[in-house]
Amino acid sequence: MTIRYRTILGATLLAGLLAASQARADGPYTFESERAAHPNMAAALHDMYVAMSHLQAAPDVFGGRKGQAMEDLQRAIISTKRALYFRMHLDDRALEGIR
């Protein structure tokens, strides 16, 4: 009899844990939770901001290519934010203020 109660208790606990993890997966998302869930995307976004600061600090002697690179990088930053935070259903204006 003791083994049966342990089995039932174990199955009940396992079912509770699975239900809790499913509820959390479907629950509200935050910027922090999304970055924690996708560290490679968060690191890529950080690296793009670092690259942008390096481009801004570079001299303006590249025949317009620096400006084009900065525009392209800004588009990449927005695209990466869209991907990283897609479950939050944010529009581009909301994404602009997020680093």
Image: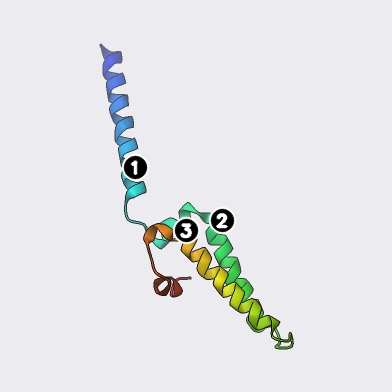
How packed mark 3 is, by other alpha carbons closer than 10 Å (few <14, some 14-19, many 20 or more), is some
Instruction: Tell me which residue sits at (31%, 19%) in the image.
Output: 7
Q: Which corner quadrant of the image does residue 96 belong to?
A: bottom left
Q: Which corner quadrant of the image does residue 54 belong to?
A: bottom right
Residue 15 vertical placement versus 89 (above, below) = above
Instruction: Tell me which residue sits at (56%, 66%) in the image.
Output: 46
Judge left or right: residue 67 versus residue 46: right
* Chain-order first, disc 3 or disc 2: 3
Classify mark 1: helix, strand or loop.
helix
Q: Nearer the viewer, residue 70 or 55?
A: 70
For badge 3, the amino acid type reads: Arg
Residue 43 in the image: state x and y as whole percent: 57, 61
Judge left or right: residue 77 versus residue 69: left
Classify mark 2: helix, strand or loop.
helix
Residue 53 in view: no
Q: Nearer the viewer, residue 80 or 34?
A: 80
Name the residue carrying label 1. Answer: 22
Name the residue carrying label 3. Answer: 35
Quadrant of the drawing holding the N terminus: top left
For badge 1, the amino acid type reads: Gln
How packed mark 2 is, by other alpha carbons closer than 10 Å (few <14, some 14-19, many 20 or more), is few
Residue 45 in view: yes
Residue 72 vertical placement versus 88 (above, below) = below
Instruction: Tell me which residue sits at (53%, 60%) in the image.
Output: 42
Classify mark 3: helix, strand or loop.
helix
Q: Residue 3 carries which label?
A: none
Residue 19 vertical placement versus 29 (above, below) = above
Disc 1 to disc 3, how far (Cα)? 19 Å
Judge left or right: residue 48 versus residue 94: right
Residue 62 in the image: state x and y as whole percent: 74, 85
Q: Residue 40 carries which label?
A: 2
* Chain-order first, disc 1 or disc 3: 1
